[in-house]
Amino acid sequence: MSQPVAGAEKAAALTAPTVVVAGGGTAGHIEPALALADAVRRLRPDARVVALGTERGLENELVPARGYPLELIPPVPLPRKPTAELLRLPLRVRDAVKRTREVLDRVGADVVVGFGGYVALPAYLAARGRVPVVVHEANKHAGLANKVGARFARKVAVAVPGTQLPGAEVVGIPLRRSITALDRAALRAQARSHFGLDPDAPTLLVFGGSQGARSINTAVSGAAQDFAEAGVAVLHAHGPKNTVAVREYPGRPPYVPVPYLERMDLAYAAADLVLCRSGAMTVAEVSAVGLPAVFVPLPHGNGEQALNAEPAVTAGAALLVPDAELTPARVAELVVPLVSDTEGLAKMSAAALGLGHREADEVLARMVLAEAGGYGIRTS
């Protein structure tokens, strides 16, 4: 009786699995999906990975650039308040589910992996009863789409303990290998040269998400003279729709404003300290590379960014400054001296490296491939 089983396993190994990832909308949903996609391809080079997205999301730029096919479906935004849009929701969901089901059938999906957001809800509903579902939730408070998907998912993976989803397994957030394998010290000289920074000056990295953050831009640029007088360089990503104007201080380390950071790995390597928002993806990346942080949580929403920062703050890897308290004076008082505190930053860096799950991408990929019947996973 053993021969048929071995034969079945061999046949399964020869059948390349098709993994459909649903993580469109924002970088916080897309980047974990792409990190998972990369891990799936490392473990099963013959696997096919297809991404779901909408015509208005960042996935239209990010997914093709990473070499994965993108299938577009209608978005299903969920109104937070009773509006006329809410009355149209059932019809929009039905249309999106129908279109998504057509995609799943056409690509021969073996498993659907959702990361929350507009794209995930129709993906979960289209796959229900037809294709195995795996849910990944990055935040402590799960979004509505993932709450729905978790009810019938085969596996539910979460980034942090305490996420209230049934059967949740803590795996962390899948991150790009360019981040988890980053040697900041080895790349520092190259990174600082790449951005036109002083090779030896203490350096602060500043960013507020892919679109920037006006409050962060105003507070940090307002302290430009304080940074210059303290001999601190600044690399400031202000967002493509914003600008930051600062004086030049001859003989002092430069303040370098850029619209967007294409090479986050080099930005992390160039920095001694980062001041940024505390989205789940950002906190995971900053911790993975061991970069001390000053987190300024987004003041809107349900407070999830403050919760994201909490473990790093508790561990001594980061400080938290409420958005309303971030002023040029506060930056000069707190951040300027911290960037030059070599001993203090070393302790924060060590604490950061003790956080997180650097292998989350492959842990989740193995979970996904198992649900897809993924024999033949590479072990080396």
Image (cartoon, helix red, strand yellow):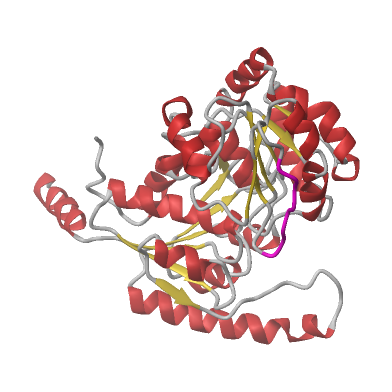
Position of residue 114 relative to residue 346, above or below, is below
272 or 139, nearer to the observer: 272
Is residue 359 among the parts visible in the rendering? no
Q: Could you say where residue 308 lies in the image, as x and y percent from the top left?
A: 71, 40
- Total labels drawn: 0
Q: Residue at x 52, y 43 (%)?
A: 195
Above or below, comparing residue 359 to residue 64 in the picture: above
Foreground of the two, 9 or 203: 203
Residue 125 lies in quadrant: bottom right
Q: The magenta stretch spans which residues?
A: 241-248
Q: Is residue 131 above or below residue 335?
A: below
* Image quadrant in which the C terminus is located: top left
Percent across and percent down for residue 109 are 37, 68
Q: Is residue 244 magenta?
A: yes
For this view, does 281 lie left or right of residue 238? left
Residue at the top extreme, as displayed: 343
Q: Which of 195 and 73 is in front in this view?
A: 195
Residue 161, picture quadrant? top right
- Residue at horizontal 81 percent and vertical 47 percent from the top: 303
The question of residue 295 being in magenta is answered with no
Q: Tell me residue 46's x, y (percent).
A: 23, 57
**Name of the residue lying farthest toward the left:** 3
Main secondary structure found in the magenta portion: loop
Q: Where is residue 221 in the image (x, y as percent from the top left)?
A: 77, 45
- Left or right placement of residue 132 versus residue 255 in this view: left
**Residue at x 54%, y 34% (from the top left corner):** 270
Q: Can residue 301 be seen in this view?
A: yes
